[in-house]
Amino acid sequence: MDSPELPHPTDNRWLAPLVGLFRSVRFRVREVLAAPTQWRRHKRRVDRAFDAAHGVDTGGVVPLHAMGVTTPSARLAVDYIASDPEEFEAAMTALAVDAERFTFVDVGCGKGRALILAARQPWRRLIGVEFSSSLCAVARTNLARAVGGARQVEVRCQDALEFELPDEPLVLFLYNPFERSLMKAFAARVAASLERSPRDIRVVYTNPFHGDEWIAAGFELCARGDTHAIYRSVARR
Ligand SMILES: C[S@@+](CC[C@H](N)C(=O)[O-])C[C@H]1O[C@@H](n2cnc3c(N)ncnc32)[C@H](O)[C@@H]1O
């Protein structure tokens, strides 16, 4: 407790602004340091609830070095971390397309959580592309458990830059799978495929750090939410 005899620092006209500044900096520092801890706790809760509800293993973080991928694009990949189901649903609501017209592709499908969520909708086909063979194996087991024979979901173990885009209307789902230069190369690949075969392609990009690469590749932004951006192919006149 402060002594009543001593002047309080905030009574001093020189000291008071410094004390105020110190307190607001201390508050901000505590806030910034607490945020990742809160986020990790929240993620652990979400992971446990999702995996228990579906009898699967989609949680946790798998760092790049543990994936065993040695291709040059591995240096530009982001660690495995599963989509948050609420964020996924928000993006799908914003997408608002007739699922039966489109093939859904999760580019960098990891352990398959987004595919499990997507399988609730009547897509023409569902495909996951993942370059880590260990994650592909986990995804296949998870899909067999959570989706079973109800829907056929194909998991292709290959690099996104080698994936042949199907010649049909597509929803490309990207949960921040790679760094800018790879996103640029992937967007250019999609643009080239469109050039050869014009069709409706939607890109659902969650945590869209490099969304401008889709604009640069000739796509237009059609929706944006707190954690997603959605782009579409522009019809050629
Ligand atoms: C953030 S996780 C997203 C997982 C999943 N899409 C989901 O929403 O739950 C990104 C995934 O992309 C994969 N990835 C990164 N670069 C890739 C590439 N060039 N080709 C294929 N997969 C890649 C990683 O191995 C990782 O599993």
Image (spheres, grey):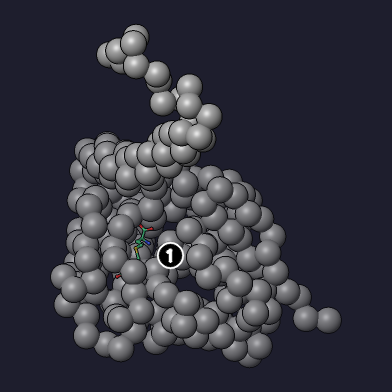
Q: Residue at x 43, y 61 (%)?
A: 175
Left or right: 230, with 143 as reference point = right
Q: Is residue 198 left or right of residue 229?
A: right
**Residue depicted at 61% across the width and 72% down the height:** 212
Between residues 159 and 208, which one lies in front from this camera angle?
Answer: 208
Local SS, label 1: loop
Q: Which residue is mark 1?
A: 176
Task: Report x, y in % for residue 107.
Answer: 42, 70
> Where is residue 81, by image quadrant?
bottom left
The residue lying furthest to the right in this view is 237
Q: Is residue 15 left or right of residue 159?
A: right
Residue found farthest to the top? 4
Against 149, is 63 above or below?
below
Residue 62 in the image: state x and y as whole percent: 21, 62
Image quadrant occupied by the N terminus: top left
Callout 1: few (<14), some (14-19), or many (20+) C-alpha neighbours within 10 Å?
many
* Residue name at image x 41 percent, y 26 percent: 9
| Camera-side residue of 82 and 237 | 82
Whether disc 1's CB lies below 8 Å from ligand 1 is answered yes
Residue 95 seen: yes
Relative to 125, residue 117 above or below: above
User: Quarter for ligand 1?
Assistant: bottom left
* Residue nearer the viewer, 158 or 181: 181
Q: Quadrant of residue 204?
A: bottom right
Please state which amino acid type lies under the numbered disc 1.
Asn
Q: Position of residue 130 (x, y in %)?
A: 32, 72
